[in-house]
Amino acid sequence: MHAATAGAQSAPEPIRYTLSFPAPQTHYVEVTAAVPTGRRADVELMMAVWTPGSYLVREYARNVEAVTASGPDGRALDVDKSKKNHWRIATGGAPTITVKYRLYCREMSVRTNWVETDFALLNGAPTFITLADLAPRPHEVVITPASGWKRSITALPAMAGGDHRYRAPDYDTLVDSPIVVGNPAVYDFDVDGKKHSLVDVGEGGVFDGARAAKDLEAVVKEDRRLWGSLPYDRYIFFNMITESGGGLEHKSSTVLMTNRWSTRTRRAYLAWLQLASHEYFHAWNIKRLRPAELGPFDYENENVTRSLWIAEGFTDYYADLQVERAGLQTRDEYLEDLSNTIELLQTTPGRLVQSAEMASFDAWIKYYRPDENTNNTSVSYYTKGTVIAFLLDAKIRKATSGAKSLDDVMRVAYQKFAGPKGYTPEQFRAVAEEVARASRPSGSPRSKGPPSWITRTRSRRTACGSSRPRPRRPTAGPGRGPASRPATTTAASSSRRCSAIRRRTSPASTWTTRFSRSTTSACAPIDSRTVSSSTRTATRSRSSSRAASNWCGFR
């Protein structure tokens, strides 16, 4: 009893925020924070300068206005701006001080804040000023919605005492939990007894939310099958239909941006589904299975890693693949998108200049700051990472006679490295090599699923193996961002070449991409520093005889 009481007394006191929107048409949110001081003579407060998942210093403090502080008696306290994103407050020894500030919220992106007459989207990093020491402590949030707004939705756990009250166990969770306030359309579904919600803001009677929720349920089930379990208690798809684009991952939610016409055409809908699939796959790959450098976060400086080609590129590979596996797009549509990614890589001169690791390392200074010379000197870690994942998947399947695949690599890596430690590039490669060396026991089942339609040709003179159709339910599919990727083709030309993909772009023209193969292996072990050498030759061929993409077998 005494020990329990002592533990309760030593538990850190939470920071308590109140968010209000007295005039949302002005794009402001007003924040009041009750900050415990521990009776220190002064405290240092800070605001994050970037958002995890978006690797650029954004300087969120630029939108902070009118910072004031007062003691328990209401007396004003001195506030000194000590750094670009820091404020030092003389407390006078008060145990708790009240800090007030306003935030201008009119940047429509998945990482920033937007407030208007109809709704508010608030992200944690650009909203909440906290104690600079970042010592573990709860953060509580109470929301006062604007007049006419009925709902607030977030992945933060709800507190007792009424609506619009939430509690984050720590600052990381606060930053990782976006909040939407207004009157969104909400579509709920359960998988494994866990609640999932599609939260649509701005449907306008056009975006088909019911259809989208049904198809998201299929994607969730497919990812559940791949990973073996769902790692959260609840998950929210925030779908901001705001004529913008992009997506940002969080542990228990994601923010997507799209336009209201995304469900009107199959291609646009597939692009939206792929975007949602990409961000949802991050619930495992990056939010829990992460590069070692991405945690604990330094919210005031760049957090550099060489592994975004795994964290983002492999996720992009699975984004499209899981939509196909869920039966939401056809094999040929999937191959078309994969082929376009290969073509994009092959037609980017910078692929021969910048490795996948360096593309990851330089994300903070290059990826988000393109210029007219970008294509000549750099490459996207999304694009190059996707192609590496594709090659590695194919290599593992060939090496194990179909008993293992990249799915097994992801599962083993998750078992070994998910949690507080993370992985290094060397550790991830070791897992891939371990899985690829696994032999297929006699009578054991082959690795499931797409590329379940990958077939091996037995004759070295056979250009492409036939694929067995599998039942699919009609629908639509994917994309990481508004643009989807087209197709490429391939006819294998010798036993020493790794087949690629064939697609007809017009009655007269087809891209054929061939991956050079060494004399010792079809797709040599993947090394992010030298991967460009395995994707070197893109040649244009002519063909009018094929109307759909076909997978060529690995011999």
Image (cartoon, rainbow, N blue to C red):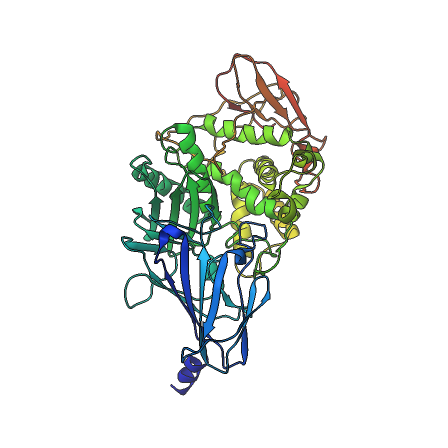
Residue 513 or residue 523, whichever sits in front: 513
Of the pair 380 and 183, the residue shown nearer to us: 183
**Residue nearest the viewer, comparing 328 with 458:** 328
In the image: residue 436, left or right of residue 199: right
* For residue 417, above or below residue 493: below
**Is any part of residue 175 visible from this angle?**
yes
The quadrant in which the C terminus is found is top right
- Residue toward you, 511 or 26: 26
- Name above or below for residue 60 compared with residue 138: above
Residue at (52%, 74%) from the top-left corner? 78
Single out the residue that lies furthest toward the bottom.
2
Residue in the image at 63% along x and 19% along y = 540
Is any part of residue 192 visible from this angle?
no
Image location (x, y in percent) of residue 548: 48, 20
Is 82 left or right of 185, judged from the image as shown? right
Residue 299: x and y, percent?
56, 60
Residue 120 appears at what percent x and percent y?
Answer: 38, 51
